[in-house]
Image: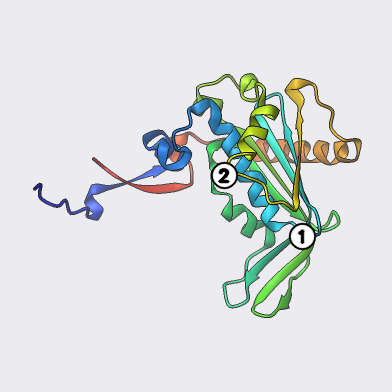
Amino acid sequence: MSERQDYTSARLTVVSLREAVQRHPRMYFGDLLPPDWPLIICAWTVHELLDYTVGTTRQVHLVLHREGALTAVANQARVAWPAVARTSAADAIVRHRMWWTQLGWSSTVTVDQVGQVPGPPHQIGDQLVWEGLRIVARIDLDADLFGIAADHLWDDAAARLRGTFATDRFRLPGDSQVSIVDEAAGSEVDPKYRDLLSEVIDRHARWVKAHPPAPWANSGGDVTDRDH
């Protein structure tokens, strides 16, 4: 029997999330091959936003952009936070849970309330609650991570995503709907969301200009990994 290894801090290294995925992809994506990873990121994003939506029919609108990005929008969202926890903003709460956004070369997650910054939450029982929110997430995926050209990330993506949502792992709840617009396939955005998406794209462009992507070796999202 081999001697048990003692993993002390001296034997641990800190790596970025991207490096952790490259070292141990099955921990994150199972047996799926890299060309399917963007679909899984879409599915994670959709399910996350659905968790915040309320109403008889919960809905998320997903747009797959030609340049290899995705935008997901949830209206009538509700964010809750333990009243005993340290105070946090609604957008920070949502952003913190979406750890996979770090697999993009850039991302933005915004939360607004009728076009305005959400006001103070109100307390319901032991929770602080923001209601009537709109959550918008945009992720510019890093094509190099998947080994695919950015303009081919979404090849036949709408059909493949429907297959993904039909699996046990990502099956959609019965009270939910997801609308998918694939720009690369020539799908048209619903006119009532066109202005919103233009606003999101403009806001994201301003964010990217103010926060140019850093080299991955210095990126955030650190994960502790054993140094074998």
Tell me the distance, in whole angstroms, between the alpha carbons under discs 2 and 1: 23 Å
Q: Does residue 165 appear to the left or right of 200 in the view shown?
A: left
Secondary structure beneath label 1: loop
Q: Nearer the viewer, residue 155 or 13?
A: 155
Where is residue 5? Give x, y as percent: 16, 51
Earlier sequence position, callout 2 versus callout 1? 1
Q: Does residue 6 appear to the left or right of 16 in the view shown?
A: left
Q: Which kind of residue does numbered mark 1 sit on?
A: Val
Where is residue 87? Give x, y as percent: 62, 71
* x 67%, y 63%: residue: 89
Q: Does residue 32 appear to the left or right of 192 in the view shown?
A: left
* x 41%, y 42%: residue: 27
Residue 149 vs 132, above or below: the answer is above
* Visual colour scheme: rainbow
Classify residue 163 by image quadrant: top right
Mark 1 highlights which residue?
54
Classify residue 37 by image quadrant: top right
* x 68%, y 73%: residue: 128
* x 76%, y 46%: residue: 177
Residue 56 vs 60, above or below: the answer is below
Mark 2 highlights which residue?
168
